[in-house]
Amino acid sequence: MTESERSVYEMVGGDATFRQLVDAFYRRVEADEVLRPLFPENLEEGKYWQYLFLAQFFGGPAQYIAERGHPRLRMRHAPFIIDQEGRDHWFAHMCAAIDEVGIQEPARSIMRDYFERGATFMINTESGTNNLMQWQNRSKD
Ligand code: HEM
């Protein structure tokens, strides 16, 4: 198998690396004044879903969808106010986690590109005002 045929999941060393990545990322979230209030008090369940999702997304077993259903990530993020500042913090922590775990090229750039675009896609407010009401009323539009 050539390098280009291997999944990112295989390149980085599989499950254990994704667990380490999520641990390193959440350690930063926990200490972040902007992001911490968005997350629930107990971070364990979210960490588990994040790990399963990322392992699946980057070519590992389809375990997230088996346990949790279709990702529908934008919808799952709709209850949280995500603005440019939060997005920038999120992305910076994920990049730092990638480097802490020691993920090498080409996987490093593939992951950074996805996180950069994905984090921007998750922005759901311009002003920082609560759009939860809008989201709850979306079917009436
Ligand atoms: C590529 C970008 C992103 C990906 C792939 C991603 C992925 C995920 C996944 C898989 C979950 C768990 C969903 C579930 O409950 O099954 C999650 C939860 C969450 N994400 Fe993201 N996310 C991204 C960007 C962001 C950004 C930019 C923010 C905020 C600035 C954010 C904040 C949250 C919060 C607050 C939760 C809930 C955690 C919990 O319930 O414990 N995410 N995300």
Image (spheres, helix red, strand yellow):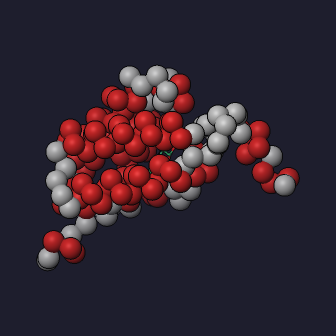
The number of numbered badges drawn on the structure is: 0
Residue depicted at x 77% and y 39%: 133
Residue depicted at x 21% and y 73%: 4
Q: Position of residue 137 (x, y in %)?
A: 80, 46
From this viewpoint, is residue 77 visible? yes
Q: Is residue 124 above or below residue 42?
A: below
Q: Position of residue 24 (x, y in %)?
A: 28, 35
Q: Is residue 19 above or below residue 63?
A: above
Residue farthest toward the right in the current orientation of the protein: 140
Q: From the image, which quarter does the C terminus lie in? A: bottom right
Q: Quadrant of residue 32?
A: top left
From this viewpoint, is residue 16 visible? no
Q: Nearer the viewer, residue 132 or 44?
A: 132
Q: Position of residue 21 (x, y in %)?
A: 28, 42
Q: Is residue 129 above or below residue 76?
A: above
Q: Nearer the viewer, residue 95 or 3?
A: 95
